[in-house]
Image (cartoon, grey):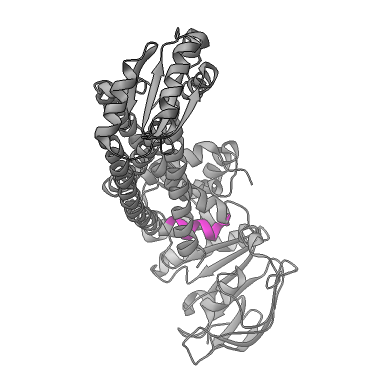
Amino acid sequence: MIKLENVTKTYPQQVQHALVHASVDINKGEFVFLVGPSGSGKSTFLRLLNKQEEPDEGQIYVAGKDIGQMSSWKVPMLRRNIGAIFQDFKLLPTKTVAENVAFALEVIGRPRSVIRAQVPAICDLVGLADKMSKYPDQLSGGEQQRVSIARAFVNRPLILLADEPTGNLDPQTSIGIMRLLDRINKTGTTVVMASHDRGIVDTMRRRVIELADGQIIRDEARGVYE
Amino acid sequence: MAIRIDYLAKETGNNLVRNPTLTAATVLTVSVSLALLGTALLISEGVSNLETHFKGDVEFIVWMDPSATDENVEVVRNFLDDSEAVRSQEWIDKEATFEQFQEFFADRPEILDLVDPDQLPPSFAVVPEFPDLALIRAIGADIEAFPGVSGVDYEEEFIKQLNTLSSRLSRIMIIAALLSAVASALLMYNTIRTGLFARRREIEVMRLVGATKWFIRIPFMLEGLLQGVIGAIFAAIAVFGLNKAIASSLAEMRDFQLFQNFALPNGEVLEVVVIIGVAGAVLGFVMAGVAVTKYLDA
């Protein structure tokens, strides 16, 4: 599903590489943790996958396609197959829960009938059926992250990228979010999650890829944070 | 990919009212610059209308009665040919006069229907040897006394001055129009840029979930287009009003009996309005395009 071959990325005006000769193979339906300290290249890894960044060297394949060769007008189609969630949720404060979720379908031109059917279903899935008309600032952090998961997943992507999704949440709330991501993973969606959260990584016992200074120093199935 | 019309209308409308003071400033600047452009065009068209008759070096026109006999005409022609003060003369017969009429009233066929070519006055267009107003006046007075002559129209000094003045004025106005067009272009650019900034979170999400480049762009480009068109509408109203004022003051000018109705006919004003509208729309669309290209594709 995802394949990196010898990928190197350096940001302009930075001496140190964000990612150095990274090669990874992730299969369909896998749940992968990216661990490592801040600045180790976790976010860069994720941003390369949906072409928010371009690698300096190496090839990246997503769903069998070399995305480095992809023409720019096809990038939106790639992103429709890749959901993304973040530490800061990136919800639109002027829209309700339902509107935030519907927005993701609206802007890719889905017909209104589809939106009307999909939005309540996905809100129900993430456990927010009774909060659809609330605004983000009326919700707790965990609920806001559920909205952002609903938005990322409403289009049924093949891949879900999660960049520190529990970074702003307390441990109890984080467990709820992880249960939800686990459930999404069980539907066949490949999940790649960058995390600092030792407790979560150790509890889940999934594949762990550890990064340090842009290099992959460990890649083990059913690993722990260490 | 299909973009829903209701989505476009909603987004473009939201963008326009999101920052009402900036939008108002932009629209007003656009309308001022387009009104200046329109006025300059009106003046130059009006002047070219005047000059259609007094073209070249023609200094005065001898109008004959439609019923004047060939003999009457011959007498005037001989007088003009013999006069030392006349360099040349051109005989404009009824058919030629009718052709001029057709040209002037091209967009008012109802008037053409009323005109019988046979009732139009033929005329001599005369170029004098010396640009001496008193001398021209004296010759004119002599000719007016001939039988069959209905009158003499002079391109007097003030008409010439009016011509020079108005062409200078329209040149100045075109410069002013260009300068304020630059100002409105910059304002439009900034309005769109501000809109992009205000919506940066939405744009970020749109990109993340896979909205196409044009889906994100088009509402902003339409916003620019609409600002230009709304500005053009205000400018068009101003230009129509100005034309009415010019027409009514022309009507009071005794010397331009023939011109008062068609110095600035509605058809020509409409042409000016179309130019204004296209200029406004293009200006808005292009500046919005520049702004989105700079801030979205970077």
Q: Is residue A52 above or below residue B151?
A: below
Is A38 in front, or is B126?
A: B126
Q: Can you say whether B178 is above or below A193 in the image?
A: above
- What is the x, y in percent for residue B107? 49, 21
* Residue for point 38% across, 26% down: B61
Q: Give the answer, above or below, for where A166 lies relative to A94.
A: below
Give percent across and percent down for residue B109: 51, 15
Q: Is residue A152 left or right of residue B237?
A: right
Residue appearing at x 66%, y 80% in the figure: A221
Whole-percent x, y for residue A89 in the image: 43, 62
Residue A140 lies in magenta, yes or no? no
Q: Is residue B160 visible?
A: yes
Front in this rendered view, residue B104 or B4: B104
Residue sticking out furthest to the bottom: A15
The quarter of the displayed image where residue B270 is located: top left
- Relative image position of residue B225 (x, y in whole percent): 45, 45
Give residue A23's quadrant in the image. Answer: bottom right
State the extent of the magenta-drawn residues as a range.
B202-212
Nearest the viewer among B91 and B227 is B91
Most common secondary structure along the magenta stretch: helix
